[in-house]
Amino acid sequence: MRQGDMMFAARRDHGDVFGFKSLVDDQPIVVTCHPHHVKSLFTADPAIAPSTAGDSPLRPIVGDSSVLTAVGERHRRQRKLLMPSFHGAAIERYRGQIAAVSDRAISAWTAGSTFRMASAAQWITLDVIMSGIFGIAVPPEPGTPEERLRSVVRWLLRGSSSRLAKPAELLNIGRDEPVGPQRIALERLDRAVYPLIQDRRRDTGRGNRNDVLSLLLDAQTDDGETLTDLELRNELLTLVLAGHETTANSIAWACERLLRTPAVYDRLRASVRAGEDDYLEATIHEAMRARPVVPMTGRQVQVPWQLGDYVAPAGTRVRVSILLVHHREDLYPDPFAFRPERFLGVKPSAHTWLPFGGGIRRCLGAALAMEEMRIVLRDIVRRTDLRAPDVAPERPLHRNVTMIPARGGRVTVEATHP
Ligand code: HEM
């Protein structure tokens, strides 16, 4: 049985809280989908319910001290350091860049072509994140370390969608360091990342730059230490890896749902083309509810934890099933219907709409991802008429910690508009 179906079946058979054994280390894992439990876990002191992100498949690549994988004081410090780059004024700065990258990409789409929206959107989100993190212009100056890094990352991405990628990723689960093809790929990546870090270290004008690398190079710990090249590399790669595929697949899911729900697609086209944004916002919320790209997150409780009638012993890894919370009939009537109207004029609530997780570990890039979704989807809907090349809905495919459209969100462009 497929992972998503298994979760729905377990909920049906056992209720809001159920358990299973981890396939990786055979340890018990408890799953909940009750909003009260979600709230208790997300709002708890991180000392008693730290994140289980140390289990992340990114850990062999970025180590255990990046903002995604660290816990405790180290996590708090890294997050504080990075937060300003992903909020308020920073998002304002990203806006122009996102619009320019999106415009370039969509202008190249031609009527009659069929492609995977996940791949098309990935080139957009990758350029956005690379420009935010490393300050790489689009297109970058030829012959610079920036250009080399961009082309290596693009090469890696082409590889990560190949048939080899899945076995290569599985090889790495539970390891401290990557092995096999992923190791070779990372060595090539490192040969591009380190020269860029060193180049920027020497750049005395970097104080005028807004990218995360320049900011982190000048950041100091409380006792005046700066980050080493290795720490910088781990932090920057975390942001690139966490920040583009997720957003691209969210865009792909939104298109997949829209093209399978013509009444919604028609209403969205009419509203966007009339210059309105309310229905677009509601559609994004609904797409992320119906198809959360990260369907599960977790905390490891350090003290016994009350989950309804069940008490999880200290040490238990408790997973919040974002997918199941989003499909609760009591929160979202007719939960399998794609209906943006449920979010019209409604602000989603923190413990019932969870595509970005919550609490102190809530996705650092949530505001950036939302802005990308708004700009890119608005452009797509305004400038193209799409249809689904296959009538059947795309089933969710679980890859590592993500849930993506099995055929990549295939679309056919029927017409383009200036
Ligand atoms: C639609 C796109 C995205 C989705 C669905 C998503 C989802 C998530 C989720 C569910 C978590 C775990 C939260 C928790 O455990 O409570 C997370 C963490 C994280 N995400 Fe995202 N994410 C997206 C885009 C991004 C972007 C654009 C960035 C770029 C900066 C990013 C960077 C991170 C980081 C650094 C963390 C770890 C935060 C921490 O542990 O403090 N994500 N994301």
Image (tube, rainbow, N blue to C red):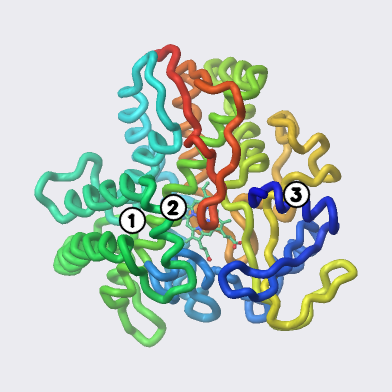
Q: How far apart are marks 3 and 1 (CA)?
A: 38 Å
Quadrant for the C terminus, please: top left
Q: Which of marks 3 and 1 is nearer the N terminus?
A: 3
| Residue receiving disc 3 | 8
Q: Which residue is drawn at 69% across and 56% down?
A: 321
* Contact flag, marks 1 and 2 (Cβ < 8 Å): yes
* Left or right for 417, reference 46: left
Q: Is mark 2 within 8 Å of ligand 1?
A: yes
| Residue receiving disc 1 | 133
Q: Is mark 1 within 8 Å of ligand 1?
A: yes
The residue carrying pointer 1 sits among few (fewer than 14), some (14 to 19) or many (20 or more) residues within 10 Å by Cα, namely many
Q: Which of 296 and 194 is in front in this view?
A: 296
* Left or right for 296, reference 31: left
In the rendered image of this protein, does residue 329 appear above or below residue 85? above
Task: In the rendered structure, find residue 371 and report the number of the disc placed on it.
Answer: none
Q: Is residue 88 visible?
A: yes
Residue type pointed to by label 2: Gly
The residue carrying pointer 3 sits among few (fewer than 14), some (14 to 19) or many (20 or more) residues within 10 Å by Cα, namely some
Q: Which of marks 2 and 3 is nearer the N terminus?
A: 3
Task: In the rendered structure, find residue 243 and report the number of the disc placed on it.
Answer: 2
Residue type pointed to by label 3: Phe
> Closer to us: mark 3 or mark 1?
3
Q: Nearer the viewer, residue 85 or 252?
A: 252
Q: Residue at x 49, y 42 (%)?
A: 249
Q: At numbered mark 3, what does the secondary structure look like: helix, strand or loop? A: helix
x%, y% of residue 121?
A: 41, 36
Q: Residue furthest front?
A: 1
Q: Can residue 79 be seen in this view?
A: no
x%, y% of residue 195?
A: 16, 64
